[in-house]
Image (cartoon, rainbow, N blue to C red):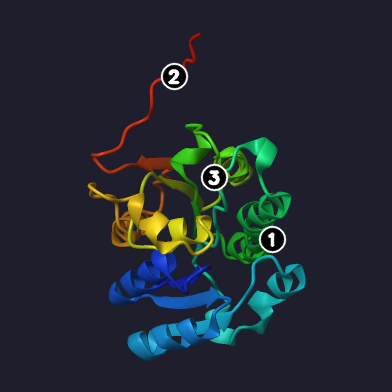
Amino acid sequence: MQQVILVTGATAGFGAAFARRFVKDGHKVIATGRRVERLEGLAAELGDALLPRPLDVTDAAAVAGFVDSLPKDWRAIDVLINNAGLALGLSPAWDADLAQWDQMVATNVTGLMHVTRAVLPGMVERNRGTIINLGSVAGTYPYPGGHVYGGSKAFVKQFSLNLRADLVGKNIRVTDIEPGMVGGSEFSEVRFGGDAQRARAVYEGITPLSPEDIAETAAWIIGLPAHVNINRIELMPTCQASAAFAVKRG
């Protein structure tokens, strides 16, 4: 069954992979992001099944009015993919850039909340829908330099579970997808301030997950019978595992 799917952060990486996969599967996709030229490129590639719309999830007023700004036949959003997010820096907490912390919270936490709040009332009124939030294994497993990024993704996990608690008895599903290492996106380059060489080094000698793997996971979730809810799904490449405890001796 064709569904209307809203994807935030659709200009690259996971978001672009989601858009391509969902259009391929026969759905209609509202692709949002800040880089208009990339949205227009996706629309040129994918045709009328994709509706490009500029949106900065940290702009509360734009988010609040977003659904009503859509053409009428695109407003009944069946699936929300809260994908917009970022990691910035790997410095230890005492040396971290406070502005980067604020930007991660504004995007990964506040932006996700506001988009969810804008879309959810329509889902409740129609008594159907699926919300997929993009979390991370960083929300479960700590690592040096992951402080606010990991904290923001721990929020996404708990927010997703609490949404399900609110929605018990309604035909609305909520899933937190929690990937490990994923290559082929701008994630590490953004984290390291555009240092492409440092970003490439993160994935040297390994086969990480790809954005298409994450899109495949989301497509599987969306395609499940309507009564099946996947609360959380954690996935890593085979080259990665959770770490042993860190112990400093001497």
Residue 118 relative to residue 229: left or right: right
The amino acid at mark 1 is His
Q: Residues within 10 Å of mark 2 (few under 14, many from 20)?
A: few
Q: Position of residue 45 (x, y in %)?
A: 34, 87
Image quarter where the N terminus lies is bottom left
The amino acid at mark 3 is Leu
Q: Residue at horizontal 54%, vertical 61%?
A: 193
Q: Residues within 10 Å of mark 1 (few under 14, many from 20)?
A: some
Nearest to N terminus: mark 3 or mark 2: 3
Residue that carries the numbered disc 3 in the rendered image = 90
Q: Position of residue 32 (x, y in %)?
A: 54, 75
Residue 131 shows which numbered tag? none
The amino acid at mark 2 is Phe
Q: Are circles 1 and 2 on residues that touch, CB within 8 Å?
A: no
Q: Position of residue 28 (x, y in %)?
A: 42, 78
State the SS at label 1. Answer: helix
State the SS at label 3. Answer: loop
